[in-house]
Amino acid sequence: MYRRDQRFLMRNHMKGNREQIYEFVKLHSSVNANHGISTNEIAEALGMQRTNVSTALGELLRDGRVKKSSSRPVLYSLTEAFADEEGAFRELVGYDGSLKYAVQLARAALLYPHRGLNVLLIGREGSGRKYMAEVMHKAAVQQGLLAEQVPFVMCDCMDFGADDAATITELLGDGTQGGMLAEAAGGILFLHKIQFLSVNVRRKLLRCFVEVEDARELPMIFLSCDDEALDVISLLEDHVLAEIRLPSLTERPLLERRKLLEHFLVAEAYRTKRTITLESEVLACLMLFPCEKEILTLKTQIRKACMNAYLRDYMDHAGELHLYISDFDPSVRKGFLNYRADKEAVDALVKPRMRYSYQEGGVTVLAPEMLPAEEAQASEPQIRTDEPSPVLLFVFYGQGVARALADTIEEQLHRGNVYAVDIPYEQKDEQTYELLRQKLLAIDQGAGVLAVYDQKVLQQMLYTISCETGMQLRTVALPVTRFGMEWSKGAAIADGVDRVYRMAAESLGALWHSPKKVIVTLCTTSEGVALQMKQYLIQHKACTDAEVIALSLSDRNLLREKLLEIMQGAVILCIIGTYDPDILAIPFLSAADVLAAPVEHLPELLRTQRMEKAEVDFDEMFRCLGDHLEYVDIGRLKEALMELAEQIEGKYPMSLDTKTGLMMHIACAVNRIAGRGVSIENPHREEIVQKYHGVYRDLRKYVAPVERKFHMIFSDDEMANIISILMQIQE
């Protein structure tokens, strides 16, 4: 009690008559910017003697904090120097835009006489409610409403357990200890996500607002809840007078979103002690992609990308982190799909073909060192605005090959419908993919694009872009560079021009054969799951026009090499597996989605990679496995694994994809071990078991009934494989 009383007295000492009057003038000015307030109005509102109010106003007038009108009665208002006192609120992006009204309400709540008003912050998850509460606390300290040493107690209501009595004790105390309410006395108590408190706890808390003899003994109460928690909002509206709603990102202008991105990028530059750079196309994607968790998603994506760039360039010590579109989640890459709808607004904020550089001091816009392909693009003809028609795109490796061909055609025809992309041999695949994607989106007029390419890897990229964007894209192989090299080598050793001619004719004739199509089934531990998925597809005749290749690779570099090898002679339609390797821009289908799809729809699913999510038919999955697992009784195995999955889910919630992949893997592992097969070695066994020791211990307990039923033992290698699937570990 002593500390609380001390804080209360300190606060009242700090806020004497003069300060109370000044605060009231500020409150009035925030609501009535163009109209002052008289001495009598102040005295009546605050319950003070007019003479005392007049004396205090005279002191404030001499200090230059208020001014008076020449009219009768005399009206007082803040001077220009004190009229704009947003202070800490200026830290909020949009304080003078989409958040202007929210800031007005926040200031009014803080300035209200005696102890301010209780505040309810409403918004979507990730909309910045916690940050707003922190800024309000900082503003209160800056304006002398709170002393720096008074407490600011913040807690997330999701952290409270299901025991209402324990929660009430922790919040309100139990007579022997004061709880959070007493801990925050004289300061601010912020309860985040109050919708997670039970109705009983909420009502108990609200009674404190009205039953306490002197409300000033309470801290200021900040509450927050999701905008969909209508029952909570309805309950609180009679007790919380300041209801502040924070807009969603979609309700805020793109300018504010760009400023938020700049804020996070500058913060990461300071954090990493590096300059962070990105191209204008990447910045545009960041401004347009949908954010599931509002501002939090923006911050998370920036940090993830910076982490990827930091790991990539750690040994270079170059002092610069360059963010490529491949450093972000796939959801960010889809931002360009919204470009057309917001083209004018984006183009006004983001200069095309520029490099943006972020450092501790702010942001700099630079003209990038242009690659040959980019130099060519700078002088391209403008996209026509009349009736849409198909366009032609040449995509070749090497310096100026595609551009020379496009320029020659344009010089002869002047149609303005031929474009080019020249790709440097040293350029990374991720950069090439994004360059192609952005180019196609820019030139497509709605009638489709014919892309002429020279290497197989480009065919794969073009196919993926077509699937992802829905663009009408047709491709023709014209590997002139490769053919030229082959013919040159042949000419050097040929005994006559007829032999070289025949070689050339055979090469050109082969161009018109349809490319081989491949579907890859993938698992990280053993070929068991990959082979089962392959057999499932073949059994149900899901891919009569494509070969199915089963791969078991956890090393990302080895996987990439293998996929590139396959792509030399085929186009990969998709990868099917228990995890998405997110590699070479190849479309991915989860094993769960494949097993959940009706058998008759499998060809369509494999062709489009699009189908509504459905529940996996585990009966069908085990029936299919039973056709191929020869060492175990599939009925007993199904029963054991369903019980095992239920136990695991009780402690480690799994997505449907993870659950499906885990059960398929364990089924194959049990069959292999029962057949006296060897355990699949996991090169990271020691590291995984040590890092996830608690998970390892739990899983050992859960798999024991399976081991007893089938008279086998899971080695530590097998356990590490199971943990890798459960915890989604990727090397």
Image (cartoon, rainbow, N blue to C red):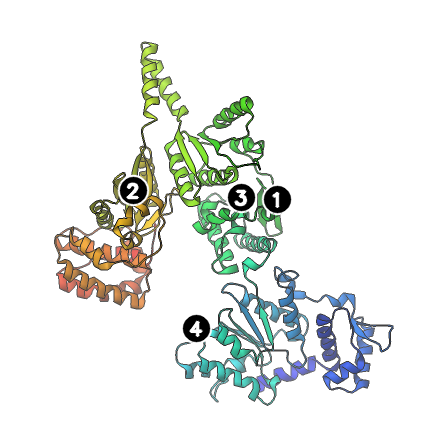
- Amino acid type, residue under disc 1 in the picture: Val
Q: CA distance from mark 1 to mark 4?
A: 44 Å
The residue carrying mark 3 is: 281
Say whether marks 4 and 3 touch (CB < 8 Å). Answer: no
Residue 713: where, in percent of width, then height? Answer: 17, 59
Q: Nearer the viewer, mark 1 or mark 2?
A: 2
Q: CA distance from mark 3 to mark 2?
A: 31 Å
Label 3: how many residues lie within 10 Å, few (<14), some (14-19) or many (20+)? many
Q: Secondary structure at mark 4?
A: helix
What is the residue that sits farthest to the top in this orientation? 496
Say whether marks 1 and 2 touch (CB < 8 Å). Answer: no
Residue 273: where, in percent of width, then height? Answer: 54, 51
Query: Between disc 3 and disc 1, whose residue precedes?
Result: 3
- Tell me what residue is drawn at x 47 percent, y 50 percent: 332
Q: Nearer the viewer, residue 322 or 22?
A: 22
Label 2: how many residues lie within 10 Å, few (<14), some (14-19) or many (20+)? many
> Where the N terminus falls, by quadrant?
bottom right
The residue carrying mark 2 is: 519
Query: Between disc 1 and disc 2, whose residue precedes?
Result: 1
Say whether marks 3 and 1 touch (CB < 8 Å). Answer: no
Q: CA distance from mark 3 to mark 1?
A: 13 Å
